[in-house]
């Protein structure tokens, strides 16, 4: 969590951490994109002249659930040496939505909300997102290959 509106601490870092005013650990509900964590756990006014009491990199995002599956079948074509192979690949088999980290800037109106899914801004040519990480919609691709 940070506040990037101006430099309150005087350390020229412009990402000042807020003070924690809540007790216990931060309540997170990563299944709710509109309220991923309790915003009242943090002070709404940044501390002046010092860094806040919130730790750096101590909070967890919503995680990632991505299951890929592939199946193939080989068919002989007349001789023992020539085969036709059919292959089907399923990316994000269960079509699970993977949310990106919640907005951690207190100066944003969306503070504490998850406003994007993983890889939603970086779609590739085949439709999968976020490179090897996955997270986009379900994609099914098929291939036929003649082997000799």
Image: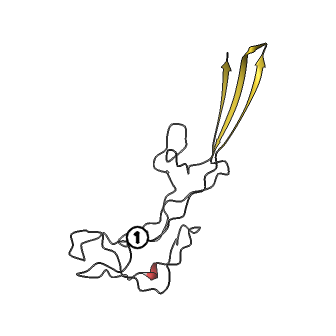
Quadrant in which residue 2 is drawn: bottom left
Q: Relative to the observer, which residue lies in front, 90 or 32?
A: 90
Residue 93 in the figure: left or right of residue 80? left
In the picture shown, does residue 137 fall above or below 47?
Answer: above
Residue 42 in the figure: left or right of residue 48? right
Q: Residue placed at 48% from the left, 68% from the top?
A: 113
Residue 5: x and y in percent read 29, 70
Q: Residue placed at 56% from the left, 72% from the top?
A: 29
Residue 16: x and y in percent read 30, 73
Screen quadrant of the N terminus: bottom left
Residue 89: x and y in percent read 65, 38
Q: How many marks?
A: 1
Screen quadrant of the C terminus: top right
Q: Residue placed at 50% from the left, 80% from the top?
A: 25
Residue density around tag 1, few if under 14, some if 14–19, many if 20 or more, within 10 Å:
few
Q: Relative to the observer, which residue lies in front, 135 or 83?
A: 83
The colour mode here is secondary structure
- Seen as rendered, the residue at the extreme front is 80
Disc 1 is placed on an element classified as loop
Residue 146 in the figure: left or right of residue 129? right
User: Residue tagged by mark 1?
Assistant: 109
Residue 81: x and y in percent read 72, 14
């Amino acid at each position: 969590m940070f506040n990037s509106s101006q430099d309150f601490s005087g350390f020229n870092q412009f990402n000042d951490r807020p003070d924690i005013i809540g007790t216990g650990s931060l309540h997170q509900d990563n299944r709710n994109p509109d309220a991923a964590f309790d915003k009242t756990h943090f002070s709404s006014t940044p501390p002046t002249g010092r860094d806040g009491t919130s730790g750096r990199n101590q909070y967890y995002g919503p995680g990632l659930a991505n299951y890929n599956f592939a199946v193939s079948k080989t068919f002989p074509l007349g001789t023992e040496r020539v085969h036709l192979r059919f292959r089907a690949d399923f990316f994000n088999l269960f079509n699970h939505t993977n949310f990106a980290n919640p907005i951690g800037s207190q100066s944003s109106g969306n503070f504490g909300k998850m406003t994007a899914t993983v890889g939603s801004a970086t779609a590739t040519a085949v439709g999968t997102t976020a490179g090897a990480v996955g997270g986009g919609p379900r994609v099914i691709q098929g291939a036929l290959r003649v082997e000799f």
